[in-house]
Amino acid sequence: SAEHPRSANGRSRGFTLIEVMIVIAVVGIMATLSIPNMTRWLSRMRLRGAAQHMVSQIDLARKMSVTNRARYCLTFGGDSGFNDGTTASYLISLTVSEETGTNTGVWQAVTEPIELVGFTNNAASDLYRGISLEPAGAGGNTSPVTGVSNCGGLVFNSSGFLDNLTADFTPCNGGSCVKYTLVNKYYSPIDERRTVWVNRGGIARVTIGPNAPP
């Protein structure tokens, strides 16, 4: 086993106060250098997690529409202040509804399964701190979506395809998709994004940045 340092007379001695202070200082410097990298890594993980959460909800809604032979409506709420440069305000909201009757345009919020009830990410729920959905329109990268049949979002038909009109889609890799862009508000100016693309077949994919198609 390791021995304690010995003094000139051969007796073992403990660490001096100066040695302890040097060790504490070195540990403190190392921690200070690592904190920014750790913080950025955690923020990126939240951004990735939020995008995958959206994809899982979209995918489950598509599967449920086929299983139940019914239309499902997914509406998304964006953060009107996504460019405010602060993590104090952030928002992603996703609501899932099922049509009551065939092509009635009447929607009822889904309450089960629990995995398909949607979610809200803000300072209260704090699912993904500082991660927002860009709003549609000027200054945002999310597609403006009008929807159909009184649904202002994605409408999955009983075959799992989107019933949305052409105006709701944007070009993506030779096809057309509805586009939802998430931002990492932890850093200002905003420089990290993930984009969820949903094609006409109802398949969702995630890419890095606001414009790279799947």
Image: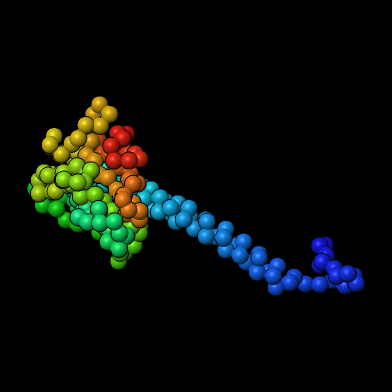
- Who is closer to the viewer here, 10 or 112? 10
Q: What's the residue at 32%, 40% (across, down)?
A: 209
Residue visible at 35% across and 55% down in the picture: 186
- Taking depth in this image into account, of 96 and 174 the one nearest to the observer is 174
Look at the image and tell me in which quarter the C terminus lies. top left
User: Which quadrant of the view contains residue 213?
Assistant: top left
Residue drawn at 30 percent across, 66 percent down: 124
Q: Nearer the viewer, residue 66 or 33?
A: 33
Residue 16 is left or right of residue 102, and the answer is right
* Numbered-mark total: 0
Estimate the x, y position of residue 55 in percent, counting from the top left. Answer: 32, 45
Quarter residue 128 falls in: bottom left
On the rendered structure, is 8 left or right of 69?
right
Query: As displayed, is residue 17 above or below residue 91?
Result: below
Figure check: 194 above or below 187: above
Residue drawn at the location 31% of the way across and 49% of the way down: 190
When the figure is inspected, residue 82 is found, relative to residue 165, above or below; the finding is below
Q: Would you say residue 14 is visible in this rendering?
A: yes
Residue 94 visible (yes or no): no
Coordinates of residue 112 in the picture (x, y in percent): 28, 57
Image quadrant occupied by the N terminus: bottom right
The image shows residue 166 at horizontal and vertical percentages of 13, 34
In the picture, measured across the screen, residue 122 lies left or right of residue 22, that is left
